[in-house]
Amino acid sequence: MHCADRDANSLHGTAEPVRDRGGTAHLPVLDVTDRARPGEAVRSRGRLDVPAAVVGPMHSSPVVRTRDEDLDRVLNIIFKGLLYTCQEATR
């Protein structure tokens, strides 16, 4: 299983339950909004059979105070990250 994250500390916490149950977790530290990085991670392991985008960028301001930059960051992570990952999984 690939467990990708921009934060190495969070990444290890995500991989722990996988390993506790006897699984193998590959831990690429990457930003999924960087178009090249998901492909590099997939190629490093040969292939990606089933992508699962389990993302939840933190955003804590009220809706009326949400800035365009905040919305762009959230949408980039959720939409572009999933799109780039799915594209690489089909190559």
Image (spheres, rainbow, N blue to C red):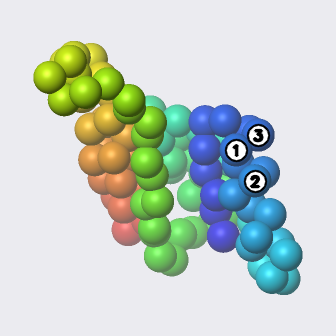
Q: Which residue is mark 3?
A: 9
- Residue 62 picture location, percent across and down: 25, 27
Secondary structure under badge 1? helix
Q: Is residue 69 above or below residue 72?
A: above
Image point 31% across, 53% down: which residue?
83
Q: Is residue 56 left or right of residue 66?
A: right
Quarter holding residue 33:
top left
Secondary structure under badge 2? helix
> Hey, what amino acid is under mark 3?
Asn
- Relative depth, front residue between 24 and 38: 24
Labelled pair 1, 2 in contact (Cβ < 8 Å): yes
Q: Give residue 10's mark.
A: 1
Q: Badge 1: few (under 14), some or many (20 or more) residues near its Cα, within 10 Å?
A: few
Q: Badge 2: few (under 14), some or many (20 or more) residues near its Cα, within 10 Å?
A: few
Measure the alpha-carbon separation of dots 1 and 2: 5 Å
Q: Is residue 14 above or below residue 31?
A: below
- Residue 20 picture location, percent across and down: 85, 75
Image point 78% across, 51% down: which residue?
12
Q: Which residue is mark 2?
A: 13
